Image (cartoon, rainbow, N blue to C red):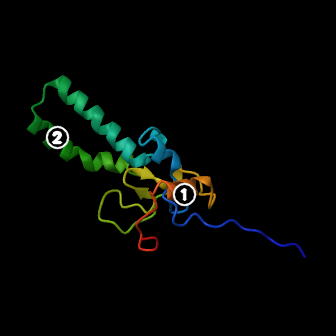
Amino acid sequence: MTARISRLSGQGCPHCRAERCLYEEHLNPGLHENHRCAVLNRLCRAFDDFVLRADVMGLPDEQAQALWESRFPATLAKEGNCQDYLPGDTTSFPDCAHVMGDLCLLAFPLCPGRCPRYLEGWARGVAPKDGFHD
């Protein structure tokens, strides 16, 4: 009979969230746009396009705001869908279990478990304050 060796989990690693490795994001925050929530990216682009058009037309801020607020439900219906959406337990938009801030956790690789980065985090004193390691 052969023995099976399994890796220790990355639980407690400062880079591991929901079994995903966020090391690259922690190294260069915001560098990779594809790590951001696709719904938030599309809504931000729609808003930026709207602001540019409002500026070109010379709309006053109050009028532009009212126009955006009236168009937002239709924009949200068009741009606010994601095949990976899973209802979360937050009160903030988009209330998806896969979203952390503006990042989509599914865009990150699976955590390989306890790796050299796990130990580096502890050595630098960035271990999480989660009640287990205080």
The quadrant in which residue 6 appears is bottom right
**Secondary structure state at the residue bearing disc 1:** strand
Residue 5 to residue 28: above or below: below
Which of 125 and 90 lies nearest the eye of the viewer? 125
Task: Report the side of 54 relative to 35 (left or right).
Answer: left
Q: Residue at x 41, y 41 (%)?
A: 30
Residue found 13% across the figure and 25% down from its top: 58
Please say if 75 is above or below 15: above
Q: Residues within 10 Å of mark 1 (few under 14, many from 20)?
A: some
Q: Position of residue 2 (x, y in %)?
A: 88, 72
Residue at the disc numbered 1: 20
Q: Given the image, on which type of amino acid does mark 2 rest? A: Leu
In the rendered image, which quarter is residue 4 located in?
bottom right
Q: For residue 119, which numbered disc appears in the image?
A: none
Residue drawn 62% across and 61% down?
A: 113
What's the CA distance linking mark 1 and mark 2? 40 Å
| Disc with the residue nearer the chain's start (1 vs 2) | 1
Identify the residue at the far bottom of this view. 1
Asked if one can make out residue 83 in the rendered structure from this viewpoint, the answer is no
- Position of residue 8 measured from the top left corner of the image (x, y, whole percent): 65, 67
Q: Which residue is mark 2?
A: 67
Q: Amino acid at mark 1?
A: Arg
Residue 9: quarter of image: bottom right
Residue 14 location (% of width, % of height): 48, 58
Secondary structure, mark 2, is helix
Q: Nearer the viewer, residue 37 or 32?
A: 32
For the image, the number of numbered tags is: 2
Residue pictured at 36% horizontal, 54% vertical: 101
Can you tell which of label 1 and label 2 is closer to the viewer? 1
Horizontal arrangement in the rendering, residue 92 relative to residue 67 (left or right): right
Q: Tell me if mark 2 has few (under 14), some (14-19) or many (20+) residues whose alpha carbon lies within 10 angstroms of its own.
A: some
Can residue 68 be seen from the camera position used here?
yes
